[in-house]
Amino acid sequence: MAATTYCSRCGTPNAAGAQFCSKCGSPLVVPGAAPLPPQQYDASIWAPPPDSDTLNAPEQKPTAAGVLSIIGGVFILLGGIAEIAVGSYVSSLTYAAGGGAIIGIGALGVIFGLIILVLGVLLFSNPDGNVTYGILILVFAFLSLISFFGGFFIGFLLALIGGILALTWKPYGY
């Protein structure tokens, strides 16, 4: 019966006659043989060592900023749609120009809501642009106040908080 060889680095049992550990890939020392000289780690050839904190590190994104901006954009979008509906109703009742102006302002709300939605999604796909996206979200959040009070004012507040969080977001460790 052949003797099992244990890895001196990780302790994994390996089959007799194996030259390298099946778990960590370290050279195995055969019992009774002279030990191998220590090897230097060459970062240009090998992957990071197993104890490196870069392994299994989750990708960092401004999640709260993106989610709040997207939800705020939805409320602003819905406020714009509601204002268009009100403008259409007013236009159907009278021939005055008031209905058309209300529809125009509602259309701005729809556009601003869509822009904030896109910027919130961009925060997820490109977290490095958080400052630019945060500033743009804040600008369009304030502009949305002209249309149905920024999406029932809830959309404005959510986009405002999302924009501020995007501006202040930093990846962990920086």
Image (tube, rainbow, N blue to C red):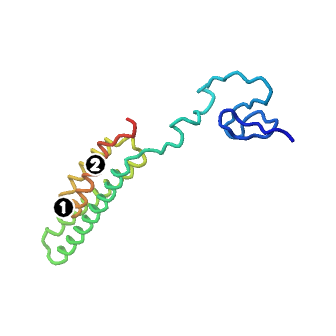
In this rendering, would 164 be left or right of 170?
A: left
Q: Quadrant of residue 16?
A: top right
Q: Which amino acid does label 2 sit on?
A: Gly
**Residue furthest out toward the bottom:** 93
The picture places residue 25, in percent across and down from the top left corner, at 69, 35
Between 133 and 58, the one nearer to me in the picture: 58
Q: Provide the secondary structure element on which disc 1 rests.
A: helix
Q: Is residue 59 above or below residue 33?
A: below
User: From the image, which quarter does the C terminus lie in?
Assistant: top left
Q: Give the residue pinned by disc 2.
A: 163
Disc 2 packing (10 Å; few <14; some 14–19; many ≥20): many
For residue 88, the mark is none
Where 36 falls versus 10 (above or below)?
A: above
Disc 1 marks a residue whose amino acid type is Phe
Which quadrant of the rendered structure holds the N terminus?
A: top right
**117 or 127, nearer to the observer:** 127
Q: Residue 79 placed where, x, y %?
A: 24, 65
